Amino acid sequence: MNPAELLAEYGDHVFDEIDLDITKESLVGFATACGEAHPRFIDSEHADFQGVPNYLTRIHGTRSLPEGFPVEMHRCFDAGKSIEVHQAVRAGDNVTGKSEIHDIFEKSGRSGTMLFIVHRMNFYNQKGDHLATVDWRLVQREMD
Amino acid sequence: MILDLHTHSIASDDGRAKVVNYCQWIQKKSLPIDGFVLTEHRQFDDANDYRALEDQFGILILKASEVETEYGHVLVFGVNEDLKASFDFADIRNPLAMVIEEAKRCGAVAVPCHPGRPKVGMCAHWETKGAVDGVEIVETLNGGSREGENEEALAYAERFGWKKIGGSDSHIVSHIGRCATKFEDEIRDMDGLITALNDGIFEAILP
């Protein structure tokens, strides 16, 4: 299948959903690991204590790709993540993450042809507020 | 007039430079270029209008495309609705001859870029798949080239009598202007660039 056919078959629906509770220890730990020093992110007693903007990039779903997606994982590597933050994540939030295939495209470069698969996770809090959109790119390179 | 004919902004999937930041960098560093052309990967950027930035910074900003073919990547200047309808810009296996022919038919100009680069440059494919009619201009100075790649492009251009352009292939702000093209006449818009490319009076330079 070409990228458009793959996207038509596997895109545009949620294929995985996770649920997790956000603790202050987790927020402080991640912020500290990132080298963040602002009290808003590392002091759980701060009046505006919240997760660092990239906090939700640490969350993975239970699946990388929809069931049956034709990919050869031994030819794949992580092509990075980007996050669009809509609202701060707070200690005590119950967060739901929903995964979908957002885009599939090909490109060619020095190393040959590559297939990019964009796994999008949308995160919501217990009130249904949209917290963030995280796009994780997986790239499959051609055979040597 | 000096233009960087090959740049990418955040509209490209691998671009990390905002157009306003290119303008600020050119101004801050007093780079000796008068403008640049955004050649986004596998698309034409219809969404963005940079006329306000042109006015603010006094820099010419034009839009084109970098498409992909079975002979490597190709810059297309003068993209219009007819050309966009004539082939799939997102396809990475477009026939080079078709891209060149359709560009000409639609009043655009197709220029194979970084032709000396492995896999995505025209030269290697030229040897294995054969010559392609219609090539008239190639990019012989590319700011992202590795050692020997621009030299190979230049050797091909001189062997076949192709005209030569330069472009930085910048994906980050500080790379803009590393290579460019010097034109005899002033260029004010894409029509002017197409005319100048067809006239053939220009040279690839390291500003």
Image (cartoon, coloured by chain):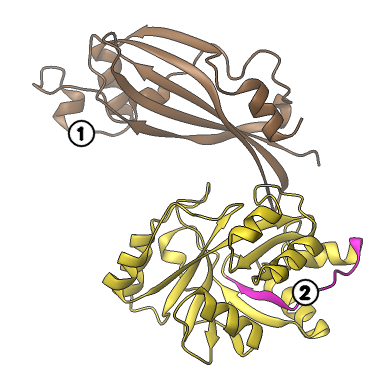
Chain colours: A brown, B yellow
- The chain letter for the residue carrying disc 2 is B
Reply above or below: B141 against A93.
below
Taking depth in this image into account, of B196 and B105 the one nearest to the observer is: B105
Q: The disc labelled 2 sits on which kind of residue?
A: Val
Q: Which residue does the numbered mark 2 point to in the structure image?
A: B135
| Picture residue at 73% right of the left edge, 68% below the top | B116
Q: Is residue A134 magenta?
A: no
* Disc 2 packing (10 Å; few <14; some 14–19; many ≥20): many
Q: Which residues are magenta?
A: B129-142
Quarter of the image where one finds residue A91: top left
| Picture residue at 58% right of the left edge, 52% below the top | B43
- Asked if the residues shown at circle 1 and circle 2 are in contact, with their CB atoms under 8 angstroms apart, the answer is no
The reply to whether residue B180 is visible in this rendering is no
Q: Secondary structure at mark 2?
A: loop
The mark lying in front, picked from 1 and 2, is: 2
Q: The disc labelled 1 sits on which kind of residue?
A: Ala
On the image, the x and y values in percent for residue A62 come to 53, 11
Taking depth in this image into account, of A69 and B186 the one nearest to the observer is: B186
| Disc number for residue B12 | none
On the image, the x and y values in percent for residue B148 come to 71, 71
Quarter of the image where one finds residue B156: bottom right
- The chain letter for the residue carrying disc 1 is A
Q: Secondary structure at mark 1?
A: loop
* Disc 1 packing (10 Å; few <14; some 14–19; many ≥20): few
| Picture residue at 76% right of the left edge, 39% below the top | A142
Q: Which residue does the numbered mark 1 point to in the structure image?
A: A37
Q: In which quadrant will I find the N terminus of chain A?
A: top right
